[in-house]
């Protein structure tokens, strides 16, 4: 496996960063998770734009302009001969000293990992997930904007551990006030009487790119959509629930905090949105050749 590291393609064993890198010492950096399907990188521009917005928000100078970063991603995919891939782009503040001061970090570290991944086993897409709401709250907007896809995922990891302790697949984090927020790496949607509901970005979620695609598909189909302030009561009484994310795509949820959702099976709207989403991933995207 070849990894892109600061301008070079290196073997996995040589892909190493300094213990003084502030990405490691402080989680000072940003990242993106992108996917390619049959040599098409899905929503590449949206991911690149979000990465640069995250970097801008933390005053991190990107080491490459956007076009060059796209070139580096394609180069890495080609080097690994990957038609279908999960692409992780990580930019850290770079190597510094033991202080927090980012001015000590002269050069950002950039690496790109391309790999094949399947987040959940295929049977769970048919059966649906069992999830729980957890005590760990999502970061509050006022402390650290959840729009910044930063290397600080500790609250999400704590939530994931809580889900594991409950022996379920995923955790839903609430806002500090107890409204629905998002899962550890996915956004959440509810279907209620043929209306599609999802927490508004102002609730402190990451504005997921898959979420945007799903909202777009729904609007095109004249499904009523509401980005809202939602409660656990709304969730328990939804007809259908599903999660969205680059890695998971669209995955149905059939049980939450022990309550069966709808008839306990993935719902029709969820399944038809999934079908359309999968079709989009085969048509849309930034084409590359191996
Ligand atoms: N929320 C969080 C916290 C995430 O990490 C992710 C995955 N990047 C998402 C939502 C889903 O976003 P996207 O659809 O852009 O992958």
Image (spheres, grey):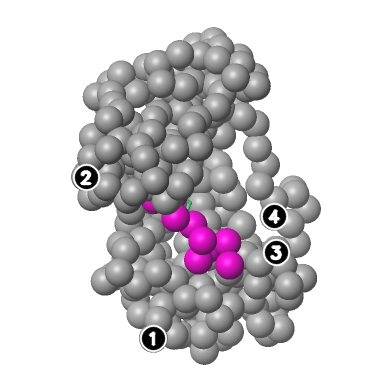
Q: Is residue 277 above or below residue 78?
A: below
User: As displayed, is residue 138 above or below residue 250?
Assistant: below
- Residue 125 - label: 4
The CA span between labels 2 and 4 is 39 Å
- Circles 2, 4 touching at the beta carbon (< 8 Å): no
Q: Nearer the viewer, mark 2 or mark 1?
A: 2
Q: Looking at the rendered structure, which numbered label has been put on residue 177?
A: 1
**Quadrant (top left, top right, bottom left, bottom right) of the N terminus:** top right
Q: CA distance from mark 3 to mark 4?
A: 12 Å
Name the quadrant containing residue 239. Answer: bottom right
Within 10 Å of disc 1 (Cα), the crowding (few <14, some 14-19, many 20+) is: few
The residue tagged 2 is 59
Measure the C-alpha gap from mark 2 to mark 1.
30 Å
For label 3, the residue is 169
Element at label 1: loop
Task: Tell me where residue 244 appears, x and y as whole percent.
Answer: 51, 56
Q: Check disc 3 and report its element: helix, strand or loop.
A: loop
Report whether 228 appears left or right of 14. Answer: left
Q: Which residues are magenta?
A: 150-158
Gap in angstroms between the C-alphas marked 2 and 3: 35 Å
- The kind of secondary structure element at disc 2 is loop
**Which numbered disc, 1 or 4, marks the residue closer to the eye?**
1
Q: Earlier in the sequence, mark 1 or mark 4?
A: 4
Rendering quarter of residue 30: top left
Badge 2: residue crowd in 10 Å (few <14, some 14–19, many ≥20):
few
Query: Can residue 24 be seen in the rendering of this structure?
Result: yes
């Amino acid at each position: 496996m070849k990894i892109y590291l600061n301008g070079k393609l290196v073997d996995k064993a040589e892909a190493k960063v300094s213990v003084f890198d502030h990405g490691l010492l402080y989680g000072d950096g940003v990242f993106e998770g992108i996917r390619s399907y049959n040599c098409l990188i899905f929503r590449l521009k949206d991911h690149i734009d979000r990465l640069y917005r995250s970097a801008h928000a933390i005053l991190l100078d990107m080491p490459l302009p956007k076009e060059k970063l796209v070139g580096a991603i394609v180069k890495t995919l080609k080097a690994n001969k990957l038609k279908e891939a999960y692409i992780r782009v990580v930019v850290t503040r770079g190597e510094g000293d033991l202080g927090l001061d980012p001015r000590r970090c002269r050069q950002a570290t950039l690496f790109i990992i391309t790999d094949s991944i399947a987040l959940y086993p295929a049977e769970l897409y048919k059966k649906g997930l069992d999830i729980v709401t957890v005590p760990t709250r999502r970061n509050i907007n006022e402390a650290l904007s959840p729009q910044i896809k930063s290397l600080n995922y500790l609250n999400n990891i704590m939530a994931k551990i809580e889900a594991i302790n409950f022996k379920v697949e995923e955790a839903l984090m609430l806002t500090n006030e107890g409204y629905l927020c998002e899962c550890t790496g996915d956004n959440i949607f509810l279907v209620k009487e043929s209306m599609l509901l999802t927490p508004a970005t102002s609730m402190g979620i990451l504005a997921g790119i898959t979420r945007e695609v799903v909202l777009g598909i729904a609007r095109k189909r004249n499904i009523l959509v509401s980005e809202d302030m939602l409660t656990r009561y709304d969730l328990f009484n939804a007809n259908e629930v599903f999660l969205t994310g680059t890695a998971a795509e669209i995955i149905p949820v059939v049980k939450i905090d022990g309550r069966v959702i709808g008839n306990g099976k993935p719902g029709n709207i969820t399944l038809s949105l999934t079908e359309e989403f999968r079709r989009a991933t085969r048509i849309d995207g930034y084409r590359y050749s191996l």
